[in-house]
Each structure stands twice: as structure tokens, then as C-alpha cells.
Image: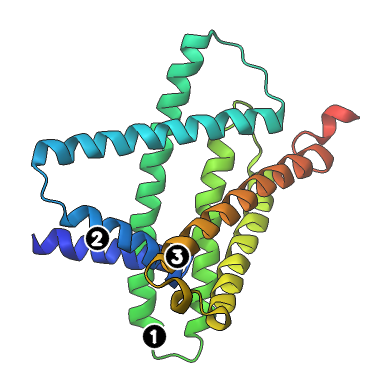
Amino acid sequence: GLISDNLAAALIDQIKALIGERAGQGLSLVISNARQQNIGSQIAGLGIVAVLLSATLVFAHLRSSMNRIWKAASKHSEIVIWLLSRLMALGLVLIIGALLVVSLALSAVLQFLFAESGYWTLIDSAASLLIYMLLFGAVYWLLPSVKVGWRDVVFGSFVTALLFWLGKWGISRYLGVAGVGSVYGAAGSIIVLLVWIYYASIVFFFGAEVTHAYASRVGSLSHRKR
């Protein structure tokens, strides 16, 4: 319907703001192709369930990787660990979804208030950094099996958010002179999306290592080495 179309368009615009125009176009192309398929409501419902299960599986693997970074030893049985990982992952999916909705509303309000201002670019960049920090901070704080200090999370998520924003800016500038779209056509957006996912994964784990290093040297874990 009209509402769902407008919601999808708004969500795609928000994702473009987060990951860049060309990478967002790749994701938009994937979504539009999927929506053009004539599928029933039951199959669509199964698709949503499959997406949620896939997302929880991804976050469960991320939790395992975070525990390895933090050298967290499990105190529960394998079944309990499996259930906790899935529940935690599902909770994170919902939290991140809520943050995206909040960021969508925040962007709309800021654009309405400051779009005509000469400081709009600066305000938009600051808002993007804040949104990135909230997203990465939620993951760094909630995923590990150990208690992570909020100061450690703030420092690590800031470094990650800054690298994420710089990557978005750098990739967009590179694409402006490289002409990927003219060489690969519509597939160029998909290529950009894949490159962006690869870069984002590197930045994510680097930020996790920075968070752990900060906590170990000057943060919440530093007193254990004295």
C-alpha cells in the first residue's frame, strides 16, 4: 500500500544516509527486485521469519567473536549458551531497529529545522556520528559475555563511528572520480554495497579490539593487571 511504500522509501533513504548513496542504491536495487516478485502473504511472512533468524545467527556469531576478543570464558552449558545467544541477538536486532527508527525521525526533524542553515552539513555529520556511536555502542556493550564499562564503550564506539564515517566519505569521493557506475552499470551499486560491507566488518572488529585495549590499559579492566 501507499503507507508501506512510503515507509520503505523512508527506510531506504535513511540507510543511504548511513552507508552512502551508491551503497544504498545497491541495497535499494535488491529490495525493489524482491518486491516485484508476486508472492503471497504466507511466503512473505516466512521471509520475514527467515530474515530474523538469519539476523540472530549473525549476531550470535558476532557474540562468539566478541567473547574471543574479550577472552570471556563461558559459565553455562552449551544449550544455555545457544539459547542466550539467540535471545541476546534477537534483542539486539530489535534495539538496532528501534535506533534506526529514532534516527529516521531525528534526521527528519534536523532537516526541517536546519536545512536552510549554513551549518546543515556540520549538523548532519555530527548527527550521523552520534547515530553510529549509539549503534556500535549498543553492540559493544551488550554482545560480550563480560561486563563492559560504559566509558570503554564510549571510547571504542567513537573510534569506530569516526572510521565508519570517514569510510563512507572516502568511498563516496572515490566513486565520484572512479566511474564505477559507468563501467559496471546497475551492478556497480551492488559492487559498492559489497565493498562497503567488507569495509564495515573490518572497522567493526577493529573497534572491538580498540574497546578491549582501552579497557585493559586505562579502562575498567586496567586495575586487574596491577
Q: Kindly identify the residue that appears in the image at 18 percent across and 65 percent down.
A: 6
Question: Which residue is label 3 attached to?
Answer: 23
In the figure, 111 relative to 22: above or below?
Answer: below
Residue 21 in view of the camera: yes
Residue positioned 36% across, 48% down in the render = 97
Q: Residues within 10 Å of mark 1 (few under 14, many from 20)?
A: some
Residue occupying the far front of the picture:
183
Residue at 47%, 10% (x, y): give it: 79
For the residue marked with disc 3, what is the amino acid? Ala
| Mark sitting earlier along the chain (2/3) | 3
Q: CA distance from mark 1 to mark 3?
A: 24 Å
Residue to which mark 2 is pinned: 32
Q: Residues within 10 Å of mark 3 (few under 14, many from 20)?
A: many
- Where residue 51 sits: x, y (%)? 32, 39
Name the kind of residue labelled 1 in the image: Ala
Where 89 sits versus 160, above or below? above
